[in-house]
Each structure stands twice: as C-alpha cells, then as structure tokens.
Amino acid sequence: MNRQLVFHLHGHAGSNTFLSPSAYYVESDCTKKIVRLYAGTAPDTNAQFDILDDGVSIFSNDTSERLNKTTGVITSLSSRAYATLLSGANSEDAVENFNDSVIEAESWITCKVVNTGSGKDFTVILELDIEE
C-alpha cells in the first residue's frame, strides 16, 4: 500500500451526499487494493458507499442471468456493487468487487453516500498501490 484516501461523514446524509474531503487528486496511476469502512454508530440496515474515479464507480457491476422456464428467454440482470457496512457492524475490512480499470494519473476520486442505514460518523478508506 502506498496511499490511503480517507473520506469522512459526520451524522446522517441525504441522497447525493458526498463525504469530505470533496475529492482527492491522484498524481500517478494506481491499483485499487482494499476499502475499509468504519461507523461511530453502527447502521440499522446495510450502509452503502460508492467510490468514483472521475465520476465513474470503481466497483464492478454484478451481472446474473435468469431463465424464464415458460418462454425459454434468458434475461441478464445487473445490480450495482458498493462498499457495504453490514447492519449492526462498526467496521469492515474487505477487498471489494473492483472493476478491472486502473485509476489513472490526473484522476479525481470522490466518495458518495448511497445509504447510511441510519448509522453515523462514517469513515471510508481506499488503499491504493502507486504504479511505477
């Protein structure tokens, strides 16, 4: 690990709320390693956060297929992946479901609250390895 980006939110947040600082500037290409989550007050339901690289999520979407047995039609279903702090937990250290892209030099990294789950005092840490 060569760099940590630390975002913080004190209290509750509404929709489209970003954590502070508002953005980090990345000077060099970086590989995503791990996301760490902490809440001073654990959420009642799962709390979710999205980390954005120039406005695009660093997490890969989960895709599955469903077969309609009556018609034989296969439907692709997608859902967004987020950094998730489970209900009742104060912390989570986990490698997340990152997409395959590298965070490129001159990128701006932000962290958006998707759902607080009624938790408070959140800290989200993204650990990066700087590529040489």
Image (spheres, helix red, strand yellow):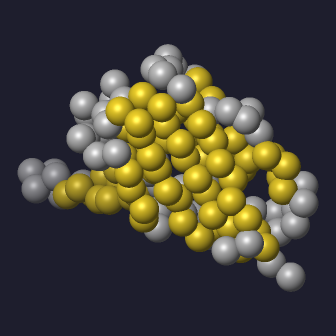
Q: Residue furthest top?
A: 14
Residue at 35 percent of width and 33 percent of height: 41
Residue at (10%, 56%) from the top-left corner?
69
Instruction: Identify the residue at horizontal 48%, vertical 32% (top origin).
Output: 121
Task: Evaluate whether residue 15 shows in this view.
Answer: yes
Vertical side of 7 occupied by 77: above or below: below
Of 92 and 27, nearer the camera is 92
Pinpoint residue 4: horizontal percent, then vertical percent. Answer: 68, 59
From the top left corner, tell me how far across and down residue 101 is, in percent. Answer: 68, 67
Which corner quadrant holds the C terminus?
bottom right
Find the residue positioned furthest to the left: 70
Looking at the picture, does residue 95 appear above or below residue 121?
below
Image quadrant in which you'd find residue 39: top left
Quarter of the figure that contains the N terminus:
bottom right
Residue at the extreme front: 40
Q: Residue 89 appears at what percent x and percent y? A: 29, 46
> Residue 17, image x and y in percent?
58, 24
Question: In which image quadrant can residue 104 be found?
Answer: bottom right
Quick check: can you spot residue 102?
A: no
Which one is in front, 43 or 115? 43
- Vertical comparison of 112 with 94: above or below: above
The image shows a total of numbered marks equal to 0
In this view, 95 is above or below 24: below
Could you tell whether 67 is left or right of 21 in the image? left
Q: Residue at x 73, y 35 (%)?
A: 21
